[in-house]
Image (spheres, rainbow, N blue to C red):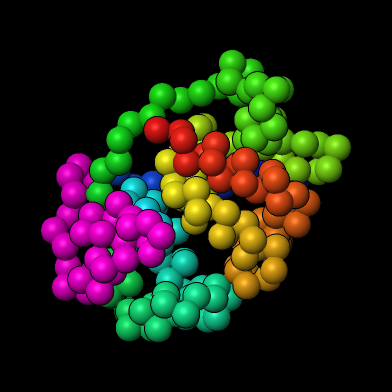
Amino acid sequence: MRVFACLISLCLLAQPAFSEPLPMPASAQLCVGCHGPTGGGIEPVGPRIAGLSAEYIAQQIALFQQGKRQNPIMAPMAMTLQGDKITQVSEYFASQALPEIKLHIRGDTVSFNEPASTLVYQGDWGRLIPACVTCHGPSTLGGGQFPRLAGQQASYIKTQLLAWQTGTRKGDVDGMMASIANKLTAAEIDALASYLAAIK
């Protein structure tokens, strides 16, 4: 049932369309040092946040403020954003364009000789691990409350999967991501991070 809930949420919570990038608000200036002026990310300091939904960005700011996501840099940064500033920052980075990616269909893409590809497009139902695309959408482009994984920094993807494992990142519905991450081996996390980062 959780899988179908993910699919329904992904359809209902589609990203709002921005006809063109919004001008940078003053409240976003603090983000530039780590995420870049258009949210393209600066590895290894800050991940790419351009093109994530405004809903997702605002939710993550709230999780940092509540201590459900832990990061010594982001936690105090998030606390500087209150009220309308959260909306301004979220909508600004959500409006930033990203390169288009060819959508891959599960049956056409999965390679059973490549474990990461199998996890991304088919999952591992023997371990109750759904495919990444089930919630993160075609080619893991994300939408609504599910972030884009395609083209994200491999180091960041790995760090976040480990954070789900250790419990330093929370806030997922019904502990879904923590449950999935805790079923992954270290080798699978490395492979997934590299595979998802290479989707460009």
Q: Which residues fall within the magenta stretch?
A: 18-46
Measuring 47% from the left and 67% from the top, which residue is drawn there? 60
**Does the magenta run of residues contain 176?**
no
Q: Residue furthest top?
A: 108
* Res. 2 in view: no
Which one is in front, 177 or 2? 177
Say if 119 sits above or below 146 in the image. above
Question: For the C terminus, which image quadrant?
Answer: top left
Query: Which quarter shows the N terminus?
Result: top right
| Residue 33: x %, y % from top left | 26, 68
Q: Can see residue 73?
A: yes
Image position, residue 65 (x, y; %): 47, 80
Residue at horizontal 34 percent and vertical 48 percent from the top: 51
Most frequent secondary structure within the magenta stretch: loop
Residue 167 vs 55, above or below: the answer is: below
- Residue pictured at 31% horizontal, 61% vertical: 35
